[in-house]
Image (cartoon, rainbow, N blue to C red):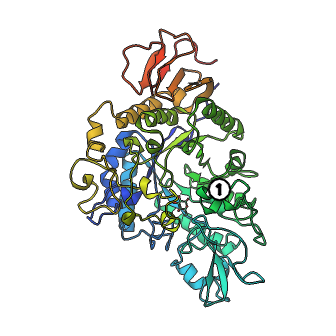
Amino acid sequence: MTTTRKAPWWESGVIYQVYPRSFQDSNGDGVGDLRGIEQRLDYIAALGVDAIWLSPIFPSPMVDFGYDVADYCGVDPLFGTLDDFDRLLKAVHAHGLRLLLDFVPNHSSDQHPWFLESRRSRDNPKRDWYIWRDPAPGGGPPNNWISDMGGSAWQWDEATGQYYLHAFLKEQPDLNWRNPAVRAAMTDVLRFWFERGVDGFRIDVLWHMIKAEGLPDNPLNPHYRAELGEKLKLLQIHSTNQPEVHDIAAAFRALADSYGDRLLVGEICLPVETLMHYYGREAPGVHLPFNFQLLDAPWHAQSLAAMIIAYEAALPAGAWPNWVIGSHDAPRIAARLGEPQARVAAMLLLTLRGTPTLYQGDELGIGKVEIPPDRIRDPQDLRQPGMGLGRDRSRTPMPWDGSANAGFSTAEPWLPLNPDWQQRNVQAEQHDSGSILSLYRELLRCRRASSALALGAFELVAADGDLLVYDRFDDRERVRVALNLAGNAIKLPFDFDPAAKLLVGTHPRESMGDMLRPNEGMAFRLSGPAAA
Ligand code: GLC
């Protein structure tokens, strides 16, 4: 393998997702803000990541906590001002980091001036900026589409006698991306931020942006079970993933490329084969269509191996992989697997081939957080109570230290802290070489120092029972990663190379040995020729 091509920064880079409401409050209102993030940049830089992705910071009624945008070119006063943003961006760059914003093009807030105009009358020039339809012939919503947050995806507007479409909350009307005026306005939005110097965007629900012409009913999902949540009642084949979405992605990409070294990451929840189309069909699409498979992958060596191999095999020529293990929408990895396996999961995430995205707080091992019913804020949870769909549990404030409110705020935080915050906080973990935070830092340091881990090829060595072993290699080195996915010791199924050098492990180790302890993971550099 030759490595003559200079990889763009984001291929060897690691993305860190900051959920601004919950990172650091600087003005004592219990909600995080931009100045707060600026104060904590040393922490992010020392962690060893390359880029920060900020969940939405734009003016918003906050019905969906910023994913309902009322002005795409501003900053919500809760988070600060545009000047604060410029300061933050400068400080991010001064720390050697990059900054990605969250672009929410599928829908705006119902308080966006575009929608306020659109709903004013049927002949308003902005009427066709959104998706309005007459009732079905016998009355009722124009088709059977269900909102991702539950209930019909159509909202009746008494004043103008039509329904409008909302794939999420009724306060989040879907924009009509078949309208060239919408495309032009949104291109201006991207330019606005690119020109301010942002390094790229994460694009919210990219696969939702275009709906099938004629808006036909979606078919029933034969595998639906009530506990999955209402949105899975139907197969969203007409409301999402239409071929024309790729023209839009290609236009975003061409625009990003015209500014140089910028990155576009797409949020797409689709099976792997379809996901791959978002790398681009006729023309390049987004650089990284998010790969969410680790979020709910069964934790068994064979199925993980099969998933990794199938994903690698499905990648189009030249496409760069990526992996995600947590987000503001998904349950915490340590809540799902427990801390010992969350450490193994960290090793997996940071040693697979592809750009990893870390979610704030996962590096501290934050696990289960019960949100008392009177403190639930997530609209998804409030609309479908008791289904376990709540996202607040992953959005609790960063615990920085053992002081009041964990150093997050001088006021009561908008969501409760993790119950173990007095021990599980940045300050405590920073001073503990055995903490999961220290492991994350070590993994990130190793990844940066190893060309094979950063950019090398992937090769499966063994997947058996609870043991997963793979190599990463380039023409300089071969690094072997061995992970024990369970709580029993396992004998390694290969002859141990006595000259191998341990690079990083979940547990301290004097020598290599031929056993993995319960929940142990290690990565070591093999001696001898690197390439197979
Ligand atoms: C994305 C966001 C999620 C939001 C939804 C609607 O999935 O990650 O938080 O609710 O889009 O914008």
For the residue labelled by badge 1, is the local secondary structure a helix, a strand or a loop? loop
Image quarter where ligand 1 lies: bottom right
Q: Work out whether 411 lies above or below 302.
A: below
Place of residue 92 in the rendered image (x, y in percent of width and height, measured from the top left): 39, 51
Please name the residue that numbered disc 1 is placed on. Answer: 225
Q: Work out whether 78 lies above or below 527.
A: below
Quarter the N terminus occupies? top right
| Residue 176 visible in rendering | yes
User: What residue appears at the point 51 percent right and 10 percent down from the top-left corner?
Assistant: 497
Mark 1 packing: few (<14 Cα in 10 Å), some, or many (20+)?
Answer: few
Name the residue at the left extreme: 403
Q: How many marks?
A: 1
Place of residue 468 in the rendered image (x, y in percent of width and height, measured from the top left): 56, 26
User: What residue appears at the point 45 percent right and 66 percent down from the top-left corner?
Assistant: 65
Amino acid type, mark 1: Arg
Say which of 230 and 446 sits in front: 230
